Amino acid sequence: MRRKSTATVLLTGASGQIGSQLCSLLRAGGHEVLAVDVHPNAQEKIELCDIGRTDHVGRLFESAAIRTVIHLAAVLPTAFRADPLAAAEVNLTGTLLLLRAAVTHGVARFVFGSSMSVYGSSHSARALSERDLTAPDEPYGAAKRAVELVGESLASATGFGFAALRIARVVGPGARSTASGWRSQIFENSVSTGGHPIAIPFAPSAQLSLTHVDEVARMLLLLAEAADLPRRIYNSPAELWETQRLAELVQRVRNIAVRMGEEDGGPTCNGTLFTQDFGFRLRGLADYLSGSR
């Protein structure tokens, strides 16, 4: 069952890989969307907003009757490590500023784009569920976990409609991070990649939790529209892929050479609770790769 609402959905990080897909999905569903990003796009109706600035955030809530917030704006891990203080101003200070404004203005649902990074960066012997202890070992994951804890506390104390999705490794078109360009390149062809091999940094035997960007957008929309939230925090459903098997599929269906590295795949994701609570059916990565030819 979905909540009926004609009020505005505020979407931060709307120019990003997930945000751009979710923005299209929201608008196609008839939602009034206030889409914002530090990289505005007039053609896509994405307005300028720096969530670290009080005046920018205040102006958002003055300009529209915002009932739902989907917060995806964040500095990604590589950039976070390069300038941790500036990144913390966005991922921590900016997010808390947005949370405060949402509470003050009576927002009914606040959906936070969290990350599997809350479990740390080491390989896990089994797929981790929400019942497993979090153990972030770098600032990006720690910031995500801190926001989760604040949101959970708000929900417990005031009934605030906070929900977080711990997103697995996302693949699909629109990845802006040059450090993870392979996530989009595997959907391209040899002409668009200039004939160069795709560099996937993980060892052939590494286990990767992967989900397509369109699937993540659907998950976030479900959390935004659900009448009730059985839980406050969910892992995203994802497929488990061995790097070698992924490389072979890409080479076969996309006709692009793939070069693998030596990194492990980090923790793997168990999204069973989300699947059960929302009846979610994940479209497989092989279908997306085959369909993008």
Image (spheres, rainbow, N blue to C red):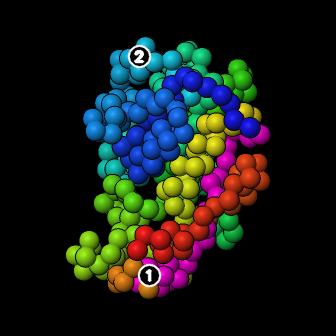
When asked about the image quadrant of residue 262, the answer is: bottom left
Helix, strand or loop under label 2: helix
Of marks 1 and 2, which one's residue comes earlier in the chain? 2
Q: Tell me which amino acid carries mark 1.
A: Val
Residue at image coords 56%, 56%: 215
Residue at image coords 76%, 48%: 277
Residue placed furthest toward the left: 194
Name the residue that disc number 1 marks: 253
Tell which of 99 and 48 is nearer to you.
Answer: 48
How crowded pointer 2 is (Cα within 10 Å; few <14, some 14-19, many 20+) is rated as: few
Residue 128 locus on image (x, y percent): 68, 60
- Report the magenta residues as a range: 230-251
Q: Tell me which amino acid carries mark 2.
A: Ser
Residue at image coords 39%, 79%: 254
When asked about the image quadrant of residue 220, the answer is: top right
Residue 151 locus on image (x, y percent): 62, 32
Name the residue that disc number 2 marks: 63
Residue 293 locus on image (x, y percent): 40, 74
